[in-house]
Amino acid sequence: MQRRVLGLAVAVVTLAGAAGCGSSDSGSGGTSSAGGAKKTQVTVGVIPIVDVAPLYLGQKKGFFASRGIELRMVTAQGGAAIIPGVVSGQFQFGFSNTTSLMLAQTKGVPVKSVVNGAASNGKVGADVTGVLVKKDSPVKSAKDLAGRSVAVNTLQNIGDTTVRESVREDGGDPAKVKFVEIPFDQMPAALDGGRVDAAWMGEPAQTVAKAQGARVIASPFAETDPKLTVATWFTSTKIAQQNPELVKKFTEAMTESLKYASGHPDEARQILTVYTKISGDVLTGLVLPSWPPQVDTASLEKLAELGEKDGIFGDKKPDIQALFS
């Protein structure tokens, strides 16, 4: 776990000296003209999972363009990798799980959540993430994960935090779970090939693994809190202070995108073909998260308590109101 904390700090320092993408002013993102109308070019750090579908859908529907924003998406493995890019100005906004944002805040990293990203759909056994094992695995429930290896996309994030809670609630010892860092898109093969005993997967990896015979033995998000705020879109405190108008426009466009995706699930699924290679039965079988426009503060307080219990935040406690309000 300490490796992830140090890695985040080093990455922030390293990237802070790098040039921003396509802009000499990382606070505004640069400008371009199209048909006489000025547009602000905004680079966004994303993860290639179903949770970010509203952003791409909002781009397609013109919700960002109507507010003068021209989006450019750059993919990363997880929120812990996106945070340094936002702080350095490589990205103006980013998508991150809420635990990684809390951890960053406790380490003095200047980040600020601006709008909700995704939440648990509250369905145990059919949530947007789940812990999966091979069909013939002896693992029957979360408590059986103690002493076994479990893949997560990044260490010290919402994945291992909520998996521990599922193990704890099922009567197992969360301290004995061995977490292994593997990108989401590589998890189905890692599980099928026996490299790990189980894998905490998001979509579309979860549906791909199910097609290979894997089964869900835990739903950490829903089991932690059925209304759990999983991730949010965030920016640096520098941009929040120096360019509040850009933040306001992005927040408005993203809120409209979340509402549209919630009301048009088939379009949300279809937009995944733009940024992933999935199609056919996998696409139609995807489990979707909930996309409420506001964060659930109570669920974030619980997540912070779990992080403290597991020693993720060290001596400091996350300030939920300052980070997410």
Image (cartoon, rainbow, N blue to C red):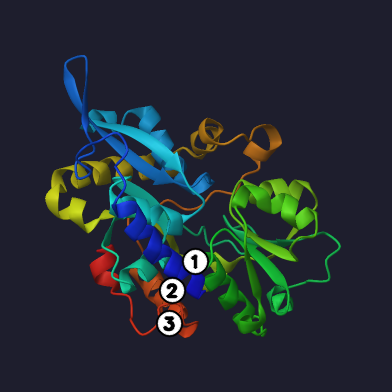
Q: Which residue is mark 2?
A: 303
First reached walking from the N terminus: tag 3 or tag 1 = 1
- From this view, report whether residue 98 is shown above or below residue 259: below
In the rendering, at what x and y percent does residue 172 appear? 67, 84
Residue at 32%, 43% (x, y): give it: 254
Determine whether, in the image, residue 75 is placed left or right of residue 31. right
Q: Residue furthest right?
A: 136
Say which quadrant the C terminus sits in: bottom left
- The amino acid sitting under disc 1 is Ile
In the rendering, at what x and y percent does residue 296 appear? 36, 65
In the rendering, at what x and y percent does residue 260 appear? 39, 39
Circles 2 and 3: CB atoms closer than 8 Å: no
Q: Nearer the viewer, mark 2 or mark 3?
A: 3
Where residue 108 sits, quadrant-wise, is bottom left
Q: Which residue is mark 3?
A: 308
Q: CA distance from mark 2 to mark 3?
A: 9 Å
Q: Nearer the viewer, residue 311 or 107?
A: 107
Residue at 57%, 36% (x, y): give it: 276
Q: Which residue is mark 1?
A: 158
Residue at 36%, 85% (x, y): give it: 315
Where residue 13 sits, quadrant-wise, is bottom left
The local crowd at label 1, few if under 14, some if 14 to 19, many if 20 or more residues have their Cα within 10 Å, is many
Circles 1 and 2: CB atoms closer than 8 Å: yes
Q: CA distance from mark 3 to mark 1?
A: 13 Å
First reached walking from the N terminus: tag 1 or tag 2 = 1
- The amino acid sitting under disc 3 is Glu
Element marked by disc 2? helix
The local crowd at label 2, few if under 14, some if 14 to 19, many if 20 or more residues have their Cα within 10 Å, is many
- The amino acid sitting under disc 2 is Leu
Q: Nearer the viewer, mark 1 or mark 2?
A: 1
Q: Nearer the viewer, residue 236 or 217?
A: 236
In the rendering, at what x and y percent does residue 228 appear? 45, 65
